[in-house]
Amino acid sequence: MFDYLIVGAGFAGSVLAERLASQSGKRILLLDKRPHIAGNMYDHYDDAGILVHKYGPHIFHTNSRDVFDYLSQFTAWRPYEHRVRASVDGQLVPLPINLDTINQLYGLQLTGLEVAGFLAERAEPTAQVRTSEDVVVGKVGRELYEKFFRGYTRKQWGLDPSELDAAVTARVPTRTNRDDRYFTDTYQAMPRHGYTRLFERMLAHPGISVMLNTDFRDVDGMIPYRELIYTGPVDAFFDHRYGALPYRSLEFRFETLDRAQSQSVGTVNYPNEHPYTRITEFKHLTGQEHAKTSVVYEIPRAEGDPYYPIPRPENAALYRRYRALAETTAGVRFVGRLANYQYLNMDQVVAQALKVHRDIVARDAAAHPTAMPPSRRAAQSPGHSDQSGATPDPLAGRAEGTVLTDSLPRGAEVVHQEEFLGRSAVGGDN
Ligand SMILES: Cc1cc2nc3c(=O)[nH]c(=O)nc-3n(C[C@H](O)[C@H](O)[C@H](O)COP(=O)(O)OP(=O)(O)OC[C@H]3O[C@@H](n4cnc5c(N)ncnc54)[C@H](O)[C@@H]3O)c2cc1C
C-alpha cells in the first residue's frame, strides 16, 4: 500500500513526491506515461552530444526566494539571462520592445524620454479592453502591433488577436531604456547539469518508487494507495465528460549545425515570416562548449501534446465545470498546469506543489495533533522514511535493477510495470 499515488513526474508531481517522502515520511509511487521523468522539463544529450530540451526551451526565472532555495538543494546553477531578438523588417531587434528596438527599426536616435513620447503618440487606447488586439494597440499603436504581435499571435494560437482574451497579452512589457533581458526576475539561472539531473536528485529517495511508460488510466484500480495526486489533464481524469478542453500544441523540429554558433542570442522570434514562431539555440541556455550547435524550431499545431490552454471565455467556462467536479472528488488533489488548465511557469508550479504539501502537513497535524513530527521520526530511523508501521512494503524482496530509462533517478526505486502489477495482484492489497 502506497500512501500516495502521484500521476505525472513533472515539477508538480516530483516536488510533491520529494516533499511527502523526505519531510512527511510517506511511501510514494510516482508514475508517468512518458518513458522519462522531468515532465516537460526533460533534457537529454542529442546524437551530437549537445544538451537539448525535448519539449521546447525551458528557461528558469523566479522572484521567489523560497522556490529558488528549495530547488537549490538538488542542483547547482549557472547564471543565465535570456535574450530574445525579433526578425522584423529585415533586422534583428530586441524584444521586449525597448529604446534600441525603436531606434533600430526607425533609424532614430531617441532618448528614453523621447521614446516614451513616441509610443504614447502612437498608442490607441480603447475605453473597453476586451481582446488581445485592444491591449497591444492600446499600448504601442497599430503599426508596432502589426510588426511584432499580430502575425506571431496568429501563428501561435491559430486565431487573430481580436479573437483572443485580453489576458493573453495582458502585459505588453515595453521599456524606454536599453534593458534587453527577456525576464526581469530576481533569480535567473539554469540548472548547471540540466533539468533531468535535477529531477534525478529530487527523486533519489528510498520512499519514492517511479514507474514510467504507465498511463494512469491503464492501472487505475490496480495499485493500492491511500490518496491520489493527479497532475495530468483534468478533463482526461473525468473521461472528458463535458468535452475536451482545447489546447494549442507545438511541433519541435531539432537541427544540429556544423558550426559553433548559429545566432547571437538564445531565441530569435519570427513574427511575420515562416511557419515557425521562433528558433532557440540551446548552447546559449546551457553554456555548453561544443564544436557544433543544436537549435529547435517551434511550429504551432492544432493537434498534439497539450501545451497551451486556449484562453477564450467558453474554454474558461468549460474548465469551471471540471473544477467543480474536481473540488467534490474526495481523496484526489489536482496540481500543476494540466490539472488546473492554466499556463503556469515552472516556478509557479513548484510554488503550488510546495503549498499543497504544506496544506497536507497542516491537515495531518490537525487530524493527529499528538503525532511525532516527521523530522524526529526521520532522526530516529535514518535512511527509511516510513516509520508509521501502518504501511507494508509491497516491493519488499523485488529483484533489483529494472531500468526503464536513461533518466533513472538514482537512489529511487524504478519499478517495472508488469513486475509490480503482477506482484500487487498476488498480494491482493487493493
Ligand atoms: C513550449 C513550452 C516552453 C516553456 N518554457 C518555459 C520556460 O521557459 N520557463 C518556465 O518557467 N516555464 C516554461 N514552460 C512551462 C512549463 O513547461 C510548466 O510550468 C511545467 O511543465 C509544469 O509542470 P507540471 O508538472 O505541471 O506539468 P508537466 O511538466 O507537463 O508534467 C505533467 C506530467 O504528467 C504526465 N501525465 C499526464 N497524464 C498522465 C497520465 N494519464 N498518466 C501518467 N502520466 C501522465 C505527463 O506525461 C507529464 O510528464 C513552458 C511550457 C511550454 C509548453
Image: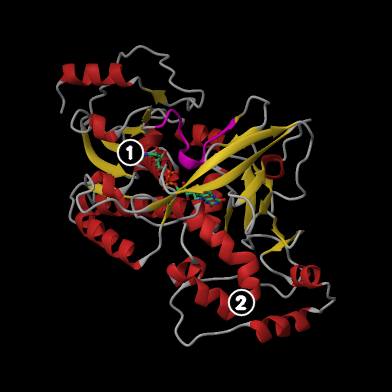
**Three-letter code, disc 2:** Arg
In the picture provided, is 419 more to the left or to the right than 328?
right
The answer to whether the residues at label 1 and label 2 have Cβ atoms under 8 Å apart is no
Task: Write down the residue under mark 2.
Answer: 142
Relative height, residue 49 to residue 119 (above, below): above
The extreme top residue here reads 399
Residue 429 pos. (x, y %): 16, 25
The CA distance from mark 1 to mark 2 is: 45 Å
Residue 39 colored in magenta in the image: yes
Residue 123 pos. (x, y %): 62, 82
Counting the numbered discs, the total is: 2
User: Which residue is found at the position 33% from the left and 50% from the top?
Assistant: 339
Q: Nearer the viewer, residue 380 or 12?
A: 12
Identify the image quadrant of residue 48: top right
Identify the image quadrant of residue 180: bottom right
Residue 314 pos. (x, y %): 31, 65
State the SS at label 2: helix
Task: Write down the residue under mark 1.
Answer: 7
User: Which residue is found at the position 39% from the left and 52% from the top?
Assistant: 247
Name the quadrant of the C terminus. top left
Can you tell me which quadrant of the image ligand 1 is in? top left
The mark lying in front, picked from 1 and 2, is 2
In the picture provided, is 50 more to the left or to the right than 347?
right
Numbered label attached to residue 255: none
Residue 55 pos. (x, y %): 52, 40
- Residue range corresponding to the magenta coloring: 34-44
Whichever of callouts 1 and 2 sits on the residue coming sooner in the sequence is: 1
Near mark 2 (Cα within 10 A), the count class, few <14, some 14-19 or many ≥20, is: some
User: Which residue is found at the position 28% from the left and 20% from the top?
Assistant: 420
State the SS at label 1: strand
Residue 38 colored in magenta in the image: yes
**Three-letter code, disc 1:** Val
